[in-house]
Image (cartoon, grey):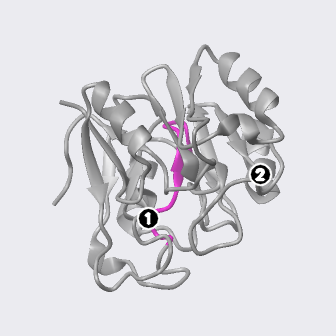
């Protein structure tokens, strides 16, 4: 059974949807030494090494992660399989070595919360509101949709980010909340559909950053 990792604070409608797909839902609960608002976010603790369902998930070591930046971003890379995007100064050495060995194009950005900030559509296509990600990605040959900042909830913070609201499951990009309320909804929809993918979102509640929806072919929990 395929496994999907989500925050323990995820809305029940998202949980019901994922369960109905036949997925095993694993909730991320924070370790005692991580107390920030992103402590339940999967993308703080693991990195999916590609865009599609077959991609492996790199599970980080909890004890390496600290409560404050940059110690909390060592695994928060955005990885499409072709591109590996992160502030490479702070990337965990084992994760970086894995990406390098796989022949991925390394894209350095000053944005440490790279996965939070980036929705991975396919191995060549990305959505972000951060120019610090968009500019080097485009220079590396990727296609990037740059959207407006904000309009996304994040508990304990002024705003969340598009990458943390979503994840790809099969040929569907699943968003946690009402994507249609985002001012760039039509652009986002067209960009995703142009890649042969569909969208699933939930008009019943606001779009919220929960640290990504991470699908894996097997449970890698320790």
Q: Residue at x 30, y 66 (%)?
A: 29
Quarter of the picture containing the C terminus is bottom left
Q: Residue at x 54, y 80 (%)?
A: 70
Instruction: Tell me the number on the disc at residue 129.
Output: 2
Quick one: 48 or 119, which is closer to the camera? 119
Instruction: Tell me the number on the disc at residue 111.
Output: none
Instruction: Residue 108: give x, y in percent of width and height.
Output: 66, 59
- Is residue 82 inside the magenta stretch? yes
Label 1 SS: helix
- Marks 2/1 in contact by CB < 8 Å: the verdict is no
Q: Left of 93 or right of it: where is 189?
A: right
State which quadrant residue 112 falls in. bottom right
Quick one: 20 or 34, which is closer to the camera? 20
How many residues crowd mark 1 within 10 Å: few (<14), some (14–19), many (20+)? many
Query: Is tag 2's residue or tag 1's residue first in the polypeptide sequence?
Result: 1
Q: Residue at x 78, y 37 (%)?
A: 145
Instruction: Residue 103: give x, y in percent of width and height.
Output: 47, 41
Instruction: Residue 191: give x, y in percent of width and height.
Output: 73, 25
Picture layout, residue 42 above or below residue 111? above
Q: Which residue is mark 1?
A: 44
Magenta residues span: 73-83
Q: Left of 29 or right of it: where is 69?
A: right
| Residue located farthest toward the front when viewing the structure as drawn | 204
Label 2 SS: loop
Quick one: 191 or 36, which is closer to the camera? 36
- Is residue 168 inside the magenta stretch? no
């Amino acid at each position: 059974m395929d496994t999907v990792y989500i925050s323990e604070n995820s809305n029940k409608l998202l949980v019901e949807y994922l369960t109905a797909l036949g997925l095993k839902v694993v909730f991320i609960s924070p370790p005692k030494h991580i107390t920030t608002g992103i402590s339940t976010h999967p993308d703080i603790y693991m990195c999916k090494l590609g865009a599609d369902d077959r991609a492996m998930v790199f599970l980080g070591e909890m004890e390496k992660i600290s409560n404050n930046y940059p110690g909390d971003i060592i695994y928060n890379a955005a990885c499409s399989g072709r591109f590996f995007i992160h502030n490479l100064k702070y990337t965990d050495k084992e994760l970086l070595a894995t990406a390098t060995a796989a022949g991925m194009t390394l894209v350095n950005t000053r944005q440490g919360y790279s996965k939070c900030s980036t929705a991975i559509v396919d191995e060549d296509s990305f959505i972000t509101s951060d120019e610090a990600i968009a500019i080097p990605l485009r220079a590396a040959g990727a296609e990037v949709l740059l959207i407006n900042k904000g309009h996304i909830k994040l508990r304990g913070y002024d705003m969340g980010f598009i990458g943390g609201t979503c994840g790809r499951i099969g040929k569907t990009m699943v968003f946690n909340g009402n994507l249609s309320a985002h001012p760039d909804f039509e652009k986002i929809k067209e960009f995703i559909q142009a890649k042969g993918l569909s969208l699933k979102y939930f008009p019943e509640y606001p779009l919220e950053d929960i640290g990504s929806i991470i699908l894996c072919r097997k449970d890698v929990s320790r």
